[in-house]
Amino acid sequence: MSTVITHHHAHHFYDKEQEASSAKLGMWLFLVTEVLLFSGLFVGYTVIKTLNPEMWKVASAQLDWVMGSVNTLVLITSSWTVALAVRAAQTNEKGEKNGQIVGLLAFTIVCAFGFLGIKYMEYSHKIHDGLLWGTKYFNHPDAIAAMKAGIKETFSLDVVALSDASFLKTLEAHTAAASHHGHELISHYASTVKYADTLMTVEQGHLFFGIYFLLTGLHGIHVVIGMSVLTWVLVLAQKGKFYKDYYTPVELGGLYWHLVDLIWIYLFPLLYLV
Amino acid sequence: MSNTQADPGYELGQKESTNYINASKGLMSWLFTIDHKRIGLMYLFTIMATFALGGFLALAVRLELFTPGETIMGPDAYNKVFTLHGLVMVFLFIVPGIPAALGNFVMPLMLGAKDVAFPKLNLASFHIYVIGTIMALYTTLDGGVDTGWTFYTPYSSTIDSQVVMMTMSAFVLGFSSIFTGLNFIVTIHKMRAPGMTWDRLPLFVWSLYATAIIQVMATPVLGITLMLLAMERIMNIGIFDPALGGDPVLFQHFFWFYSHPAVYIMILPGMGVMSELITTFSRKRIFGYRAIALSSIAIAVISFLVWGHHMFVSGQSAYAGMVFSFLTFLVAIPSAIKVINWSTTLYKGSITMDAPMVWAFSFLILFTIGGLTGIFLGALGTDIHLHDTYFVVAHFHYVMMGGTAMAFFGGIHYWWPKMFGKMYKEGPARFAAWTVFVGFNVTFFPQFIMGSRGMPRRYYDYMPDSGYQIFHQISTVGSWILFVGMLVMAVNLLASLKSGKEASANPWEARSLEWLTQSPPIEHNFHEIPTVVEGPYEFPIATATANAQGAESSDS
Amino acid sequence: MSNHDAHHDDHHGHHVTPLWLYHAIFGGLLCLTVITVWIAQFDFGAANTIIAMLVATVKASLVALFFMHLLHDERLNMLTFGFGLLFVALFFLFPLVDITTRTYIDPIKENSSVRILDKEMEAQQAHAEKHKKALGKLSNLYKREFMAPAEGEGKAKPAPEVPAAAEAVEGQAAEAK
């Protein structure tokens, strides 16, 4: 635990310096490809927002900025700890800091789990309210028509108007007896009541949520990939592989994790605040 | 003689018995090799196989158009065949073609390096390429796609075919391309031999560098575009769907942000090969080294500014159209710089018309025609008339096949002795090159004419009395000539592996580093890393060479 | 800080950032997060996005320069990243140019440009009227010069050239005025 395994550079490099600096340049190029991958969604965001400014204002106000802020803090903290882990590896002389590297990486991974947990809570709330993409959006004409037909069939009631609170009471009277599908229909109608003054007043609100799920979903996938990479680095650090002359995997894993943070730094205000 | 201090001094006589080909045996030693030369060869043969597949599909398309109405297949089959022809040729042949096959083999040798920076990534790139290829072929057998290789929405997001699978295959192939590009950039930055400064890099390496920039910067956008298209189909997300408030033209922006620069991914390496061929077979220092090198980078950057010229009739704003049209003309400048510098290099050179040089001349002529017709298409007003006609088809075949493919085959003939240590027969090689040149022009020149007269591209049929038939028939006959040329080339090259003469280390008396090591090279390229003291094109003074080689020059 | 840059180029990532700097950057990031949330409650109209993006860019720069070591690393890495951002900018630029100017030629959407288009249409119609008159003159001329001797050998000009000739006549007419 308190020793290090000496690293030998690959045969086609002259020395460790060349190997490390090549690896880092390669990583930066890879990060650039990641930025460009995300930029596609950001361009989509900008274009759709420019085409539907009013809808955007109303729809983005439905996100929970508190959860977004907490998640920002969680990610920034994890970014800080992973930076410290890299520093610990940089200054690791004979393995005396192995434990510190492992601890900091473990804390970072815990933060990542925390981030995903909060994201899960947000997602389940959106799914419950039918704030989804495309034709799955609660206010999409197809979805509304399907709900009306479902209520007619299940409860033998005619939906005269949407967003009618008294009709919702009538529906909720059936709650106890309702099947799973029945519950879904009731909560769908409840959404139309809940968002009567907001989302029900604008068209194409599903586009915002489509972009929201695409952006946060792709980002979430990157969080998961980053966690896996950091876990792998953690296992190697446990074996004492990293010391002042060789810490490339810690550094590259750290860079990847910082990128995940960088993207969130832009995602957060764009989705939750403006 | 040598441009290095430490001359490894490989001559035919002192050739070692082990080289990279026979160093280890067995299928696994090839499939899981991390030697850039072996990976390059595996790429080469896979790519040639896909080229043959794409070629047969093209022959089928041409044969179908020989007569109006149904000739050999129905309209649905026709749509699938031309789509597959486009996809195979673009994603499986031209994009990886020169960089992954020739570049992989030659570039580290040219730099005086033992391998690329990330050999395992290089292997992964090949494996991913094979997986992507298998996915694409599986999709074809599983019903195929009839959207054209451009996957335009809303057709592609609503039509009932295997679009998702096909986009995923292109997505996977994109990774392969990114890995190659990333690897090359790092290799060129970090793995150069001592003394190999940026102004001593062979121009092929410069062009690969420019190509790699585009591969790294543009391919991720293709990835997200195809992912969004898949999301559109699977989840009805609506970004590209006008019925859901989205914008189908946005898809075209996304698509061409990658696919226009991708056109330069295809042509830039070809230009690099040209620079090598022209200077070697003129026995003259390349004219305007720095201009050619920097024009590659300029092309790479400008290529990102012009994509809207594919969208003049798509419904994008007229203002954007004007801006794009203007910017499009900028690309002509660096392209012309190259062509003019090559021509100037030829001037008063002692030119030998060996087979690679015949291909190079084909490139020069065909690319110039392709480039100049591109100016017509870049002009906003003219394009309204020519858009989606056979004029466009002829234009991009002149650039892509007349340009890149000619350079690719020239490069194969040039480096073949280095790759396998065998010489092919010169006579059939030249015959093949000239036949392809003639066949190409017979195939595609009539398409300019019928395109300017309004024959739309991608159409299965045409009216019998519309006057198009004669052009279609000439074109189809041309495709047969083309086929004969390709067949002769393939047979000649493959035969040389069995019965070719032993090649010397430097059969063309070229000056760049790959010719310093023996043919075929040893496993780790060089015993001793050479120290470079001069540029790659320091040929002896032209007049002296002309005297010394008088006999050789006169026979061509 | 920037004075150090040149010296650290050759160190290939061996520069060790002092601990206090990491902590300071972390503190700075937390503060900026609070600021961006706090400032979002005020409505600055179109400037909302710009302000939020400015704050985000400061945060991102701190992460990239210090946590990701770009400041003291090889200059090439910073160039690489910067070059990537340049392409992101291009990707934003052109689609935005397109969608913000698209309505100028789209008469279906209701906006001021429709009126501009109407004016253009009127101007075009007036032009067409003028053209028609000139064409009338020309056809008279044509009839007089070429039609009368019906058996004229090949003198009759082919029809497609009429518009070009019409412009010429129109030009003469304008000059005459």
Image (tube, helix red, strand yellow):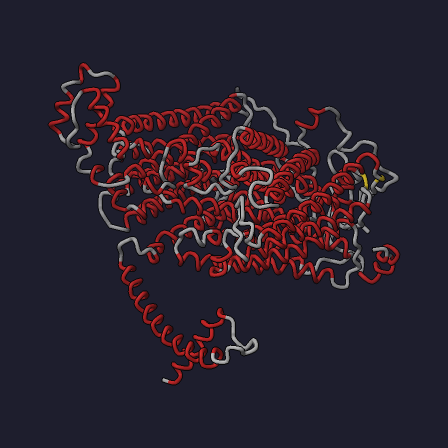
Residue B526, visible in the rendered structure: no
Nearest to the observer: residue A62 or residue A232? A62
In which quarter of the view is residue B242 placed?
top left
In which quarter of the view is residue B467 placed?
bottom right
For the image, the number of numbered tags is 0
Residue placed farthest to the bottom in the image?
C176
In which quarter of the view is residue B125 placed?
top right
Nearest to the observer: residue A271 or residue A210? A210
Residue B461, visible in the rendered structure: yes
At a point 44% along the width and 59% down the height, the residue shown is: B323
At a point 69% along the width and 28% down the height, the residue shown is: B30
* Residue B94, horizontal then vertical, whole percent: 61, 43
Residue placed farthest to the top in the image?
A177
Residue B407 vs residue B310: left or right? right
Residue B294 vs residue B387: left or right? right
Nearest to the observer: residue A152 or residue B534? A152
Residue placed farthest to the front in the image?
C151
Residue B518 drawn above or below residue B296: above
Quadrant location of the C terminus of chain C in the rendered image: bottom left
* Residue B2, horizontal then vertical, whole percent: 80, 50
* Residue B138, horizontal then vertical, whole percent: 56, 29
Residue B41 vs residue A158: left or right? right
Nearest to the observer: residue B533 or residue A173? A173
Residue C7 drawn above or below residue A66: below
* Residue C116, horizontal then vertical, whole percent: 29, 63
